């Protein structure tokens, strides 16, 4: 019974780490309907932090494709000629995380004789910046964080996680000018 309690406590702790968090920042003074076209800005030279993704062209191509689909759905068109209104840039990173949860017996939160729990996991972060090409100012930034355990080495899981992160993030992007046509 004691072992079952420990297993359940670890599962709860890991599940607590597994919730995807998504948010964004918007430049309040910007009228997004003034923007119609976009293109990709220059990539940063920062590695993702995990060679399994740094050396994975599927990840980069799939991520960019997912972002492009959501931009189109929000009323932004990829510029084929001329200068775009917006430049889009992303950065992804994977970091090793360790969470140590000491038991809070004082507050009544205690599992399995109040033993501390250690959870070791990989956390992925995706940041998408939308920059006004004329001013160079970031007008919208979205980000998503989630655990990457068991994801990076499985293309179908990676695809699903990219889809979920990009979809949830891009819901927060205001509609662009092409959506009003």
Image (cartoon, rainbow, N blue to C red):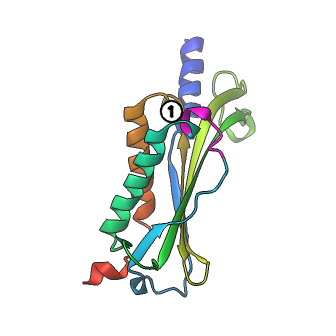
Where does residue 18 sit, x and y in percent of width and height? 52, 39
Q: Is residue 173 visible?
A: no
Where does residue 150 sit, x and y in percent of width and height? 49, 28
Q: Local crowd at mark 1 within 10 Å, few (<14), some, or many (≥20)?
A: many
Specify the segment rendered in magenta. 47-53
Q: Is residue 161 above or below residue 86?
A: above
Q: Is residue 69 above or below residue 95?
A: below
| Label 1 element class | loop
**In screen coordinates, is 9 left or right of 150?**
right
What residue is drawn where x is 59% and y is 25%? 10
Q: Which residue is mark 1?
A: 152
Residue 49 vs residue 22, the one in the foreground: 49
**In screen coordinates, is 65 left or right of 121?**
left
- Name which quarter of the figure residue 121 lies in: top right
Q: How many marks?
A: 1
What residue is drawn where x is 61% and y is 78%? 137
Picture quarter with the C terminus: bottom left
Q: Is residue 53 above or below residue 69?
A: above
**Which residue, as the protein is rendered here, is positioned at the far left?**
181
Q: Is residue 91 visible?
A: yes
Is 119 magenta? The answer is no
**Which residue, as the protein is rendered here, is positioned at the far front?**
81
Picture quarter with the N terminus: top right
- Name which quarter of the figure residue 114 lies in: top right
What residue is drawn where x is 42% and y is 63%? 170
Where does residue 166 sit, x and y in percent of width and height? 43, 55
What residue is drawn where x is 44% and y is 50%? 63
Where does residue 70 sit, x and y in percent of width and height? 36, 62
């Amino acid at each position: 019974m004691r072992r079952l309690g420990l297993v359940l406590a670890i599962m709860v702790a890991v599940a607590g780490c597994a919730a995807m968090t998504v948010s964004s920042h918007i430049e309040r003074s910007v009228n997004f309907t003034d923007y119609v076209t976009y293109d990709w800005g220059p990539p940063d030279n920062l590695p993702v932090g995990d060679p399994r993704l740094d050396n994975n062209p599927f990840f980069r191509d799939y991520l960019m494709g997912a972002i492009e689909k959501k931009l189109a759905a929000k009323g932004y068109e990829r510029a084929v000629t001329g200068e775009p209104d917006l430049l889009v840039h992303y950065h992804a990173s994977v970091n090793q995380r360790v969470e140590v949860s000491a038991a809070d017996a004082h507050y009544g939160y205690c599992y399995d004789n109040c033993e501390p729990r250690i959870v070791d996991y990989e956390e992925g972060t995706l940041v998408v910046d939308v920059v006004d090409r004329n001013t160079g100012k970031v007008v919208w930034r979205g980000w998503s964080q989630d655990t990457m355990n068991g994801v990076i080495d499985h293309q179908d899981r990676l695809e699903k996680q990219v889809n979920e992160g990009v979809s949830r993030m891009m819901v927060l992007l205001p509609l662009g000018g092409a959506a009003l046509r």
